[in-house]
Amino acid sequence: MMKTEEEILKLMRDCEADNVERTAATKDTDKFAIAICAFANDFPAHRQPGYLIIGVNDNGDLSGLKVTDELLKNLGGIRSDGNIQPLPAMNIQKFSFPQGDVAVVEVPPSDLPPVRYKGIVWIRIGPRRAVASESEEKILYEKRTSASKTFDAQPCLECSLDDLILDLFSVTYRSNAIDPEIIKENNRSIQHQMASLRFFDLKKNCVTNAGVLAFGKNPLYWLPGAYIQFVRFDGEKITNEPIQELTFSGDLLSILRELDSFLPSQIKSRPVQTSMLREQDQTDYPFIAIRELLMNAIMHRNYDSNTPIRFYWFNNRIEIQNPGGLYGEVTPENFPLQNSYRNPIIAEAMKALGYINKFGRGVLRAKEFLAQNGNPEPNFNFNPTYFNVIIWSSQ
C-alpha cells in the first residue's frame, strides 16, 4: 500500500535514505527507468519498496512541479514498454502540497532478480546507482524467492545443457537481451550466463522450463503439450473434413518464425469497391491481428498442461484455444485492460526476439486491426482451464 502524505514528506527530507531517489526532472525516462530497475533488484536486501519521487530537489525541497496526467501516463508506460525485464511491479500516485506536486513511483522488490533495463542490471549501493558486477549479479540470482517461482522459472530436472541448442542462446538470444558492452566483459560460464536470464537453475544444476522451451533440441520430450495444432476445415463445423493439418513444434524461435511465414499463405484477399471508380483489396483476416492473438496464446498458455494450443480455421471463423484460464489479477470484467503474466520469462524472451513490441497491448491491437479490416468483434470465452477466442471472417 502506498505511503501517506506525511510519510512521503518524511522520505523527501531524509537525504540519507538509500531506498529513495529524488529528482526535479520530468522527462528523463532513462533516469526514471534505471531507478525503478535498481529498486526492483533490492541489492541491499531491505525487502521493502523503493521510491522514485519526481518534483523534489536533491536537498529535499519541493521544486514547484505541477503533476499532469501525461506525466503519470508516461511513468506507467515505463513498465509496459518492455525495456525493463522481468516486468517490475509499480504503484504510481500524485501528492499535492502547498509548495507543489510530486509524482511517487513505489517499486517493491522483484521475486525474479536480476532485473535489467535495456540489457543492463542496475543496483543501488547506498545513495549511488551502479551497473552490477558479475559477482553482484550472482548475489541477485541467489536471492530469488524459490517459493514464488512461476512454472517457466522452475527447474526441469535432468535436463542438461546437452539437451539445448546452445548457439540459439549464445549467438542469437544473448545479443538481443544483453547490452553488447556487458557481453564483452562477461567471463562467466555458460551456466551462469543462462542463470542470470532465468534459463538455468544453478542450485539444481539443470535447465529451467523456460530454457527448455526457448532453446531445447526437443522440448516435447520434457513438456509434451508445448506445440500448436493447426487444422483447416472444409466447412463451419469441427465434424467437417479437414483439408490441412500441421503441427508447429520445436524451440520458441523456430515456432515463431514458422508461424510468420505460414500465416500469409492462409489469408485470402478480395477486391472491395470503395467508390464508383475505385476498388481496394480486403483480406478475410488481417495478418497482424491473427499473429497478435497467436503470440498471446503462446505467451500465456499453461505449459504444465499436455494439451496443445488449438489453432482451428473454419470457412467463416478462426478459433484459437490455449490451455490455462485467465491468470493472476485478470478477470472477465477487466480483460484485456489488466495484465498478469503466467510465464514472465517466456514473455521476456518473445520481447527480446522482437515478437512483442509492448506488453499488455496484443489483444487491443488485434481488436483494432480487426475493426479496421471490417471484421466483426471477436468473441473471448473464459474458462478456468482454457482461454478461447473466435475471430470472425470479414466476408
Image (tube, rainbow, N blue to C red):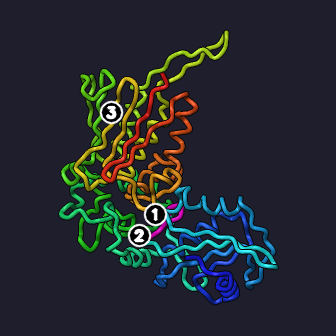
Quarter of the rendering containing residue 157: bottom left
Lower position in the chain sequence, tag 1 or tag 2: 1
Q: Which residue is mark 3?
A: 312
User: Which residue type does callout 1 highlight?
Assistant: Pro
From the image, tell me which residue sits under label 1: 86
Kindly check if marks 1 and 2 are in contact, taking CB atoms under 8 A apart as contact.
yes
Q: In the displayed image of the protein, which residue is found farthest to the front?
A: 333
**Rendered view: 307 above or below 177:** above
Q: Amino acid at mark 3?
A: Tyr
- Report x, y in % for residue 244: 27, 25
- How crowded pointer 2 is (Cα within 10 Å; few <14, some 14-19, many 20+) is rated as many
- Residue drawn 28% across the image and 37% down it: 229
Please rate how many residues cluster around mark 1, counting C-alpha atoms within 10 Å: few if below 14, some from 14 to 19, many from 20: many
Residue range highlighted in magenta = 114-119
Please give the name of the residue rendered at 50% of the width and 50% of the height, measured from the top-left corner: 336
Tell which of 312 and 217 is nearer to you.
312
Q: Dot 3 surroundings within 10 Å: few (below 14), some, or many (20 or more)?
A: some
Relative to residue 252, is residue 288 depicted above or below? above
Spot occupied by residue 146 in the image (x, y as percentages of width and height):
32, 74
How many marks do you count on the picture? 3
Label 2 SS: loop
Residue in view at x 57 percent, y 86 percent? 126
Drawn side of residue 74 relative to residue 338, left or right: right
Q: Is residue 311 above or below residue 83?
A: above
Residue that carries the numbered disc 2 in the rendered image: 112
Identify the amino acid type marked 2.
Answer: Leu
Q: CA distance from mark 3 to mark 2?
A: 35 Å
